[in-house]
């Protein structure tokens, strides 16, 4: 329910802000770099048609999945994430989070789900958030981002991060198609697989009631 | 002058004078970092330099030193640990303790390698570290509260649920000599009574938020190194056991293979076969809800567990392992539901799980022998296997009420105070509890006797064939019946473990436990990738030797000698079903002679010699010991 409300609210804001933007900025607004490259890419793909149709590509897309019961709370993923993006060992800057609910003895991995109809993308008043055509990741273009944090509020999973060092809004970009969190997870609590395969793996985990392999 | 860029180490030490409420930040001296690495090593050197033999563990002038190592918080596997060092509450000499979880790395991310506490606060305080901001705050609101409550209140007061806190519970506040410093609720630095030292300083907690991270020298190497290490770790023979059962697997190993498990205050050699299936690793596995790991650990040897039957059916809690199971055996309680309750209660009250269990087991033996009765124990029936009595007594120990006040002194002091010849039932070396029966073999015996922090298996007990691998000799740690190679192996392990505790990584994934896991060559590789300094494995081992000599020298300064490196009478006279039956005193003393000689220490006194200390670059310590008349100039 909460999710629904947020989406509607942000969508509304998105429309108003965009209308205001075009009113004030008009033609002065330059085509941002990211959009230019997207255009370039579009032109390129048109010249070299893909073997799969767009629908097929969407279906076979790889995505992140989490299985909370397998999470040991070790935060190796946070460390690897921050290291990949900033070349420093600093989980405070990680783009996914292990939330430690200590009273409930739970460790919950929270990752960006790169929603099909992304509330963050819709909430962004300046169009800084877009979807990467190759990986399907919803990404922020820091050149356009104005740091208003509307996306932070819009995200139903609250997994858009405000970076403690730069105070900029950041989010998961799937490491360009090879997410480090899934790569280093020792138990498979965070895994990266085809969108249609992921649910089946989760279903099996649940049915087998098995968390780890017994020696 | 511009500060030299350092990698791995954060480069800053905080010194907190609690009496004068003064906080000073100092740069980490490069010389100290190069020669002692960090963690336990630097802690030990600072302790030696600043605490004299005349200072009581609870004196404001005692130091409480927290230390992380150059690898803490980096992507090196199991880089989660930190070490706390002080003059120990029950050893009255050197004591350090090591804990995992998430506190150590957070401290490092805030930008600090070590914190040194001295003095005593007038009113209870806690230290709040928010990156560069470090301040003492009033802790009267949480003084007297248990670990879980205090943790909740602090997080709410600061307004960030993800801060990491190391704190003491009522046990530390009441100066119980087995009090622990707890972090992440279920992780404890429990050895040496350092929680009581923290309590004596009226310091309730240290709360940290770190967002600065750690810089590494060769970031391009780290990711590959990580993958390589994880593969190696997962390929090691013991990995699958540790990652599934955790340490409780060792109960089976000890009971069935080594034929020894401390049971009923060492009155039984091991858990009887009729009881063991109820309390072995398979029975343990039935309680598992999920697995828990420390920061950046791929081994995940911790668990969340739930009770299955009996009065503790509804208990759900984190983290009991080998030690808590031993506690049950010691008190003659063969019920894992109780063990879970015991683990949760000791965590909640902030006390080391073993301390009260050994003290209660000692009292239970007195009860059985008719030396104490209900009149002494405030009406609690301390019979073997009495679960209610054990829990009631635990509470009394923590709050130092009635008979609990005596047991809160730890077995050695309690027996000394109680008298009546009960000292022979207190199984300790230098005040430290004996966790692995020394009668199982000579290396076990030697390492437990010579450990610098009291009888302890984590300082030098050979638990793998790494010694043989390193020196290229034939050596089988599991065959502990001959004395051949034993002093050499113990020395090697002592030195190597000192390196591990200083880096700091977890011993479970290193040569300490398994020779096909990480060892000195890997440490050197990691140090190069993280700090940029090229150490050879031999140099690291040399540093380990230096650290161990500092610890030993501190004990010498505090008046310990060769005579303290021995066991209670029982282990020399009462045989068990092992290859060496019981310790032969003559062989044991000969073994010690060889150990001191190989160490380069005085065979008569057990003190490090001037020549050895100078050879290790510790001439300041050598001249100090000469000045005090402990060693000859």
Image: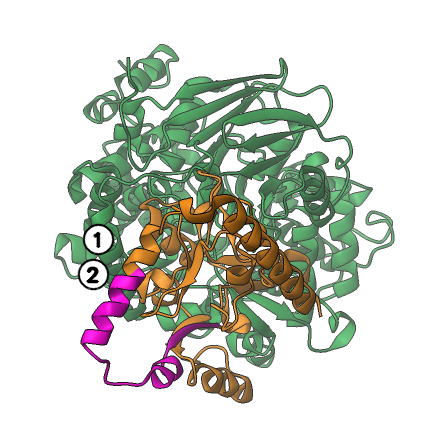
Chain colours: A orange, B green
Residue at 35% x, 64% y: name it. A179
Span shown in magenta: A38-65
Mark 2 or 1: the one toward you: 2
Callout 2: few (<14), some (14-19), or many (20+) C-alpha neighbours within 10 Å?
some
| The image quarter in which residue B537 lies | top left
A34 vs B404, nearest the viewer: A34
Q: Dot 1 falls on which chain? A: B
Q: Quadrant of the N terminus of chain B?
A: top left
Residue at 58% x, 57% y: name it. A14
Answer yes or no: do the residues labelled 2 and 1 have beta carbons within 8 Å? yes
Query: Residue beneath label 1, please?
Result: B485
Q: Looking at the picture, does residue B172 appear above or below residue B578?
A: above
Q: Position of residue B189 (x, y in %)?
A: 53, 44
Q: Quadrant of the C terminus of chain B?
A: top left
Counting residues from the N terminus, which is met first, the one under dot 2 or under dot 1? Answer: 2
Query: Residue beneath label 2, please?
Result: B475
Q: Looking at the picture, does residue B494 appear above or below residue B23?
A: below
Residue at 58% x, 59% y: name it. A15
Q: Dot 2 falls on which chain? A: B
Dot 1 lies on which element? loop
């Amino acid at each position: 329910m909460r999710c629904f409300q947020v989406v509607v609210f942000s969508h509304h804001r998105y429309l108003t802000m965009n209308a205001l933007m075009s009113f004030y900025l008009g033609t002065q607004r330059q085509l941002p770099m990211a959009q230019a490259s997207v255009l370039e890419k579009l032109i390129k793909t048109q010249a070299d048609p893909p073997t799969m149709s767009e629908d097929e590509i969407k279906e076979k897309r790889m995505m992140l999945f989490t299985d909370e019961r397998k999470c040991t709370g070790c935060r190796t993923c946070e460390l690897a994430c921050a290291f990949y993006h900033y070349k420093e060992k600093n989980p405070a800057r990680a783009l996914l989070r292990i939330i430690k609910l200590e009273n409930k003895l739970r460790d919950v991995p929270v990752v960006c789900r790169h929603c099909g109809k992304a509330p963050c993308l819709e909430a962004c008043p300046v169009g800084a958030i877009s979807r990467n055509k190759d990986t399907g990741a919803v990404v922020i273009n820091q050149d356009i981002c104005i740091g208003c944090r509307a996306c932070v509020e819009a995200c139903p999973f609250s997994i858009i991060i405000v970076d403690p060092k730069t105070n900029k809004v950041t989010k998961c970009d799937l490491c360009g198609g090879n997410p480090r969190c899934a790569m280093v997870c020792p138990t498979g609590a965070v895994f990266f697989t085809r969108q249609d395969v992921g649910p089946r793996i989760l279903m099996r985990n649940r049915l087998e009631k098995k968390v780890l392999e017994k020696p | 002058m511009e500060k030299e860029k350092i990698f791995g180490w954060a480069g800053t030490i905080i010194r907190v004078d609690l009496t004068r409420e003064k906080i000073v930040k100092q740069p980490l001296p490069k010389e100290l970092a190069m020669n002692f690495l960090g963690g336990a090593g630097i802690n030990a050197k600072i302790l030696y330099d600043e605490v004299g033999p005349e200072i009581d563990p609870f004196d404001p002038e005692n130091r409480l030193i927290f230390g992380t190592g150059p690898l803490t918080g980096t992507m090196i596997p199991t880089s989660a640990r930190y070490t706390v060092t002080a003059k120990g509450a029950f050893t009255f000499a050197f004591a350090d303790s090591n804990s995992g979880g998430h506190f150590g790395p957070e401290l490092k991310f805030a930008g600090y390698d070590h914190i040194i506490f001295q003095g005593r606060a007038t009113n209870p305080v806690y230290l709040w570290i928010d990156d560069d901001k470090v301040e003492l705050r009033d802790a009267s609101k949480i003084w007297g509260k248990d670990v879980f409550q205090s943790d909740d209140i602090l997080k709410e007061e600061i307004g960030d649920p993800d801060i990491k806190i190391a704190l003491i519970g009522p046990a530390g506040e009441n100066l119980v000599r087995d009090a622990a410093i707890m972090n992440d609720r279920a992780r404890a630095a429990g050895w040496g009574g350092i929680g009581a030292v923290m309590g004596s300083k009226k310091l309730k907690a240290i709360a940290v938020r770190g967002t600065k991270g750690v810089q590494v020298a060769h970031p391009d190497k780290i990711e590959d190194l990580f993958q390589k290490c994880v593969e190696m770790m997962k390929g090691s023979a013991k990995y699958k056991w540790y990652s599934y059962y955790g340490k409780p697997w060792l109960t089976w190993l000890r009971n069935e293979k080594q034929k020894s498990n401390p049971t009923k205050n060492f009155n039984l050699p091991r858990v009887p076969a009729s009881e063991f299936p109820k309390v072995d690793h398979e029975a343990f596995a039935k309680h598992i809800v999920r697995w828990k790991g420390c920061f950046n650990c791929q081994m995940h040897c911790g668990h969340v567990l739930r009770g299955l039957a009996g009065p503790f059916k509804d208990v759900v809690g984190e983290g009991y392992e080998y030690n808590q199971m031993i506690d049950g055996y010691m008190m003659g309680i063969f019920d894992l539901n109780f063990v879970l309750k015991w683990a949760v209660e000791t965590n909640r009250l902030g006390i080391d799980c073993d301390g009260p269990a050994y003290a209660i087991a000692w009292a239970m033996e007195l009860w059985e022998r008719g030396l104490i009765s209900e009149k002494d124990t405030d009406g609690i029936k301390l019979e073997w296997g009495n679960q209610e009595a054990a829990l009631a007594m635990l509470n009394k120990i923590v709050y130092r009420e009635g008979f609990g006040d005596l047991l809160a002194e730890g077995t050695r002091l309690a027996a000394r105070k109680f008298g009546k010849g009960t000292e022979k039932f207190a199984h300790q070396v230098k005040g430290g509890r004996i966790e692995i029966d020394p009668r199982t073999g000579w290396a076990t015996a030697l390492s437990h006797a010579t450990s610098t922090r009291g009888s302890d298996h984590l300082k030098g007990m050979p638990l793998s064939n790494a010694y043989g691998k390193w020196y290229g000799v034939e050596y089988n740690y599991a065959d502990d019946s001959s004395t051949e190679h034993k002093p050499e192996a113990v020395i090697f392990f002592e030195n190597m473990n000192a390196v591990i505790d200083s880096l700091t990584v977890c011993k479970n994934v290193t040569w300490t436990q398994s020779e096909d896991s990480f060892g000195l060559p890997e440490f050197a590789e990691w140090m190069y990738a993280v700090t940029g300094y090229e150490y050879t494995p031999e140099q690291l081992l040399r540093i380990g030797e230096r650290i161990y000599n500092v610890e030993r020298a501190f004990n010498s300064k505090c008046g310990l000698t060769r005579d303290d490196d021995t066991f209670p009478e029982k282990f020399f006279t009462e045989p068990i079903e092992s290859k060496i039956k019981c310790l032969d005193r003559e062989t044991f003393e000969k073994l010690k002679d060889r150990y001191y000689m190989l160490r380069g220490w005085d065979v008569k006194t057990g003190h490090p010699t001037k020549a050895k200390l100078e050879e290790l670059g510790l001439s300041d310590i050598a001249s100090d010991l000469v000045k005090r008349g402990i060693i000859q100039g």
